[in-house]
Image (tube, rainbow, N blue to C red):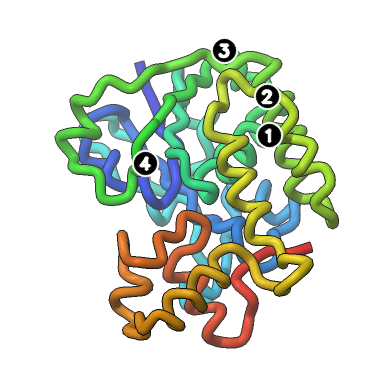
């Protein structure tokens, strides 16, 4: 059986975990800056390229990030999943907001593919993929669910809400139940907390950052390094790099 794993850039370690014939890390970061258009995203998955500031403005195709698999014989630069004769697609996305956004995006994309419903499996990854030891990725038991039409529709609704120009639909997600997507609502809450406060105009991370600086923590390393004092789950170093160039690191509407 040919199996492919779709994951985020946090899950590149799965390449060495012997879980699949091929691991495809998806590079988009939907938590900061303008969202790519639907056309751009689809073109990327079907062979087109993507240019982003966190990539040094160089063009990257999804296949550029896929390691060769001598066992499977899969080529390095070919069309997306259906061209391989893949029999199973596993989705590995951890609870972080960035990963959950990528999960609902890729589910929404697969929803329209005729082969997806019977081949897609969702792994409930309840730990951070970034930095996870290869032994854990290889041997840890990860609960697996078949993806149903209900799950595809839930992802469509959630992705449409996030792409909306105002946050009302995202707030509406908090009142809905997503059994196969247990981390979606907590991620949505964290994303909504980054909207500007009506009192201070600051998002949650910005307010925490200023509070830490006011308390004397003004060294870049102790604030922004992984597991540092800021403890941000929404933004990463790429988002803060954009901020330092004058771009607000939140998709505040």
| Labels 3 and 4: the sequence-earlier one | 4
The residue where tag 1 is placed is 108
Q: Disc 3 versus disc 2: distance between alpha carbons?
A: 12 Å
Q: Position of residue 95 (x, y in %)?
A: 46, 39
Say whether residue 46 is visible: no
The quarter holding residue 29 reads bottom right
For label 4, the residue is 75
Q: Secondary structure at mark 1?
A: helix
Residue 138 is left or right of residue 238, and the answer is left
Which quadrant does the C terminus fall into? Answer: bottom right
* Camera-side residue of 229 and 214: 214
Return the residue at label 2.
152
Mark 3, residue position = 118
Q: Residue furthest front?
A: 215
Which is more foreground, mark 4 or mark 1?
A: 1
User: How far apart are the alpha carbons under marks 4 and 1?
Assistant: 26 Å
Depth check, front residue: 239 or 138: 239
Q: CA distance from mark 3 to mark 1?
A: 15 Å
Label 2 – label 4 distance at C-alpha: 29 Å
Q: Nearer the viewer, residue 220 or 59?
A: 220
Could you tell me residue 74's position as x and y percent?
A: 35, 35
């Amino acid at each position: 059986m040919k199996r492919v794993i779709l994951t985020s850039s946090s899950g590149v370690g799965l390449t060495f975990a012997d879980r699949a014939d091929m691991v495809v890390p998806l590079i988009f970061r939907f938590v900061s800056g303008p969202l790519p258009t639907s056309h751009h995203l689809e073109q990327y998955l079907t062979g087109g390229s993507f240019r982003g500031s966190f990539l040094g403005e160089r063009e990257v195709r999804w296949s550029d990030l896929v390691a060769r698999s001598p066992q499977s014989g899969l080529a390095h630069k070919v069309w997306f999943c259906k061209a391989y004769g893949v029999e199973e697609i596993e989705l590995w996305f951890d609870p972080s907001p960035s990963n959950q956004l990528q999960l609902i995006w890729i589910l929404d994309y697969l929803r329209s593919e005729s082969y997806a419903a019977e081949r897609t499996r969702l792994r409930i990854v309840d730990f951070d993929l970034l930095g996870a030891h290869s032994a854990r990725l290889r041997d840890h038991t990860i609960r697996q669910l078949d993806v149903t039409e209900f799950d595809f529709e839930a992802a469509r609704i959630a992705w449409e809400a996030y792409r909306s120009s105002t946050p009302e639909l995202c707030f509406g997600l908090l009142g809905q139940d997503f059994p196969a997507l247990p981390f979606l609502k907590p991620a949505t809450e964290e994303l909504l907390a980054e909207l500007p406060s009506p009192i201070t105009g600051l998002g949650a991370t910005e307010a925490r950052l200023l509070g830490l600086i006011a308390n004397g923590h003004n060294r870049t390393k102790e604030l922004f390094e992984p597991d540092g004092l800021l403890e941000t789950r929404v933004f990463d170093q790429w988002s803060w790099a954009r901020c330092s160039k004058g771009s607000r690191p939140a998709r505040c509407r």
